[in-house]
Image (tube, grey):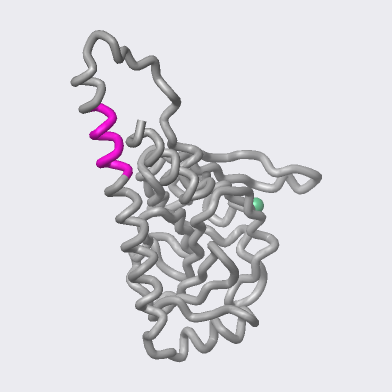
Amino acid sequence: MTIRATRQDRHSSTERRFSATCPTRGNHRWGNNVEKTARRIGTVVALTTVIVLGLIGGLTSTAQASTATTGADVQELLREYPGSTQVGPHTVMVKAGITVTSPLATVKGCQFGFLCLWSDAGWSGYRIDFYHCGFYDLGAIGFPSGGRWNDKVSSWINNQTSGTLARYYNYDGVSSFKQVYADRAYHSIAGAGDIGLNDIIDAVRPC
Ligand SMILES: [Ca+2]
């Protein structure tokens, strides 16, 4: 029972982040094979621990990176996003859970736990990352060189917890967003044009 309580605590501490991948409660047969079941739960706890530690590691490295020097590209982003703060060598946090990265960052610098969208094919150009679950209208988020993030995405990496379903939408021009694609982590698209979606996506639901 202690193990079960620990799992719940960790689940709740990660808020909605794991809601899409948290396994449903199965019908464990405690009476017939207690040892086997205990091993299975032990494995789940171990995996959860690795994932949580991985997240903590990622967040810690982000926090440590905040001491990086402010280059011209970050200064530009800080001007573009008033109120934003630098959280990496080439990244600013626009608001909680949303960061924007300049093209000077590593091309495949998408951190574990995030859905990362790039403005150019081949994981290049500006990048915007989403960590929290929810529906995000890209048309409501300014693009660094002008305009908004809608109709800008040309490649992406769904680097969230394995199996997490991300959804991608196009605005129908009238009244609603229509889902045009979905993928489960880990998954990447090098060129959205290859699937007929270059500069099409207007909204995402990371999880
Ligand atoms: Ca569109």
Q: Is residue 32 left or right of residue 18?
A: left
Q: Nearer the viewer, residue 142 or 65?
A: 65
Expressed as whole percent of the image width and height from the top left, the position of residue 83 reads 63, 81
* Res 94 quadrant in image: bottom right
**Secondary structure character of the magenta stretch overall:** helix
Q: Nearer the viewer, residue 42 or 180?
A: 42
What is the residue that sits farthest to the right in this orientation? Answer: 174
What is the residue that sits farthest to the front in this orientation? Answer: 2
The residue lying at 61 percent from left, 45 percent from top is 169
Q: Is residue 193 left or right of residue 47?
A: right
Which residues, given as a range, are shown in magenta? Answer: 40-48
Which quadrant: the N terminus? top left
Expressed as whole percent of the image width and height from the top left, the position of residue 124 reads 40, 67
* Res 148 quadrant in image: bottom right
Expressed as whole percent of the image width and height from the top left, the position of residue 38 reads 24, 25
Q: Is residue 157 magenta?
A: no
Expressed as whole percent of the image width and height from the top left, the position of residue 178 reads 66, 40
Image position of 67 with respect to 109: above or below? below
Q: Is residue 34 left or right of residue 114?
A: left
The residue lying at 42 percent from left, 90 percent from top is 71
The residue lying at 37 percent from left, 85 percent from top is 68
The residue lying at 59 percent from left, 51 percent from top is 201
